[in-house]
């Protein structure tokens, strides 16, 4: 078995679906979690800047497989998902898994605009503008896409008849929205879906033991 | 051979690397190009809104393969690249191709901020701020990543010893930067690289004949 090392920060963020893939495949990996606050803009510590210099693209996560560094979270997840059997069962399923993940990233960009404005304490009127013009339309489109897929796909998963890494990535994103109070009871089917993924026996213990984190 | 139909706008944008993959593989496809101006924010025509409603994620490109719609440009490119042999030769090469494409998208987000501010005629001071704080640092990182890869990889391609869809996507992005005057002579090695990709015999005719377009 290859030697796997995942380097990321002590948040869920871009690293969590990768960690979950290892748990699903029951495959050991070294789970290195650097302090997230060490890289905050304007507050970067010398330790972090030293580590950053040596990374392929200057950012994390990075997966190291027998000494080879692989950057970019979706590239890492896809790589492991293919190895472990969670990438889709046909070329068309693989393409749909990829499409859902990229759509989720398009929405995440809009969600991040709101998180950013909130955390950096923009004036209330500006936060409100971002919420109404960027976040809400993005979220409504995204939820309607998810709801449509879950209705049309009787398996209860987003693609095909089994779990894929698109489910991991989407469930993590929904969990974050719930934590921010942005996924309400009117979307009960999405909350149910997220709970169903989180209840998978291979994930449950990991999820119960992981440190709580809003992002 | 499957029946392929690509629906996009009459720009290079997210569609061009997909078109190039078909040309490289010498595979016929229906190249539907809708008027880009029909979807401009605030100026959407009824025809476009009608088409939009029927799309899986409400946006283009969409590839239709024997009647199955696949959305999201990177998902489409990866799907075709795997079929046509341009996705990388090992799982690790595939992961690096994916990582470079995603890094290019991270940079494209910063580039788009500048294009957007320029096209929408933001106040000059604001454009200048975006250029200096967002675009330039992003571009410098991106160019240094590309230069490092091209130096360390003797094949002249970004990954492994042959052409991959990462080269198509990156060359297209460099071409756009050149057109905007944002890729200067101090990066001669990147201009040479872009020209080398564009000179591939399977691409040359397509590139000579395609309509000129700044994006
Ligand atoms: N598109 C990248 C984004 C990675 C990213 O933004 N990483 C952040 C942490 S979440 C980082 O490394 N920040 C530290 C820095 O930029 O110095 C991915 O998906 O891996
Ligand atoms: N992440 C998507 C982005 C697609 C996208 O932004 N498409 C634009 C044109 S370049 C579009 O369809 N705009 C029309 C609209 O949103 O109504 C992809 O890579 O395919």
Image (spheres, coloured by chain):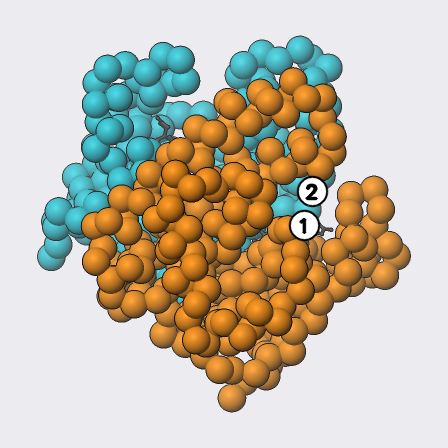
Chain colours: A orange, B cyan
Left or right of residue B26, residue B120 in this image: right
Marks 1 and 2 close (CB-CB < 8 Å)? yes
Q: Which residue is mark 2?
A: B140
The answer to whether B168 is drawn above or below residue A74 in the figure is: above
Left or right of residue B95, residue B84 in this image: left
Q: Quadrant of residue B164?
A: bottom left
Q: Is residue A212 visible?
A: yes
Q: Is residue B98 visible?
A: no
Q: Which residue is mark 1?
A: B144
Left or right of residue A45, residue A137 in this image: left
User: How packed is label 2: few (under 14 Cα within 10 Å), some, or many (20 or more)?
Assistant: few
What is the x, y in percent for residue B142?
A: 63, 46
Query: What residue sits 46% from the left and 40% below the top?
Result: A184
Q: Nearer the viewer, residue B5 or A36?
A: A36
Q: Nearer the viewer, residue A50 or B140?
A: A50
Secondary structure beneath label 2: helix
Query: What residue sits 78% from the left and 43% below the top?
Result: A41
What is the x, y in percent for residue A147?
A: 31, 45
Q: Are marks 1 and 2 on the same chain?
A: yes
| Gap in angstroms between the C-alphas marked 1 and 2 | 6 Å
The answer to whether B94 is drawn above or below residue A22 in the figure is: above
User: How packed is label 1: few (under 14 Cα within 10 Å), some, or many (20 or more)?
Assistant: few
The answer to whether A70 is drawn above or below residue B189 in the figure is: below
What is the x, y in percent for residue A205?
A: 54, 75
Chain letter, disc 2 residue: B
What is the x, y in percent for residue B199?
A: 40, 46
Chain letter, disc 1 residue: B
Query: What residue sits 34% from the left and 48% below the top?
Result: A189
Query: What residue sits 74% from the left and 56% below the top?
Result: A36
Left or right of residue B76, residue A191 in this image: right
């Amino acid at each position: 078995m290859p030697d796997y090392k995942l380097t990321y920060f002590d948040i869920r963020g871009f690293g969590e679906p990768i960690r979950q893939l290892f748990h699903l495949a029951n495959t050991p990996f070294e789970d290195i979690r650097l302090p997230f606050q060490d890289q905050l803009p304007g507050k970067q510590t010398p330790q972090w800047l030293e580590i950053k210099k040596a990374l392929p693209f200057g950012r994390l996560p990075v997966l190291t497989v027998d000494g080879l560094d692989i950057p970019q979270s979706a590239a890492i997840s896809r790589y492991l998902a293919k190895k472990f059997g969670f990438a889709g069962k046909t070329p068309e399923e693989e393409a749909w898994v990829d499409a859902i993940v990229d759509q989720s990233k398009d929405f995440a960009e809009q969600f991040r605009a709101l998180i950013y404005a909130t955390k950096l304490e923009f004036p209330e009127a500006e936060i409100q503008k971002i919420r109404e013009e960027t976040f809400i339309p993005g979220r409504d489109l995204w939820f309607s896409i998810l709801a449509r897929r879950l209705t049309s796909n009787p398996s209860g998963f987003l693609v095909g008849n089994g779990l894929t890494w698109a489910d991991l990535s989407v469930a993590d994103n929904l969990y974050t929205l719930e934590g921010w109070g942005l996924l309400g009871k009117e979307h009960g089917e999405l909350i149910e879906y997220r709970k169903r993924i989180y209840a998978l026996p291979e994930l449950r213990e990991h999820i119960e033991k992981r440190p709580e984190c809003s992002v």
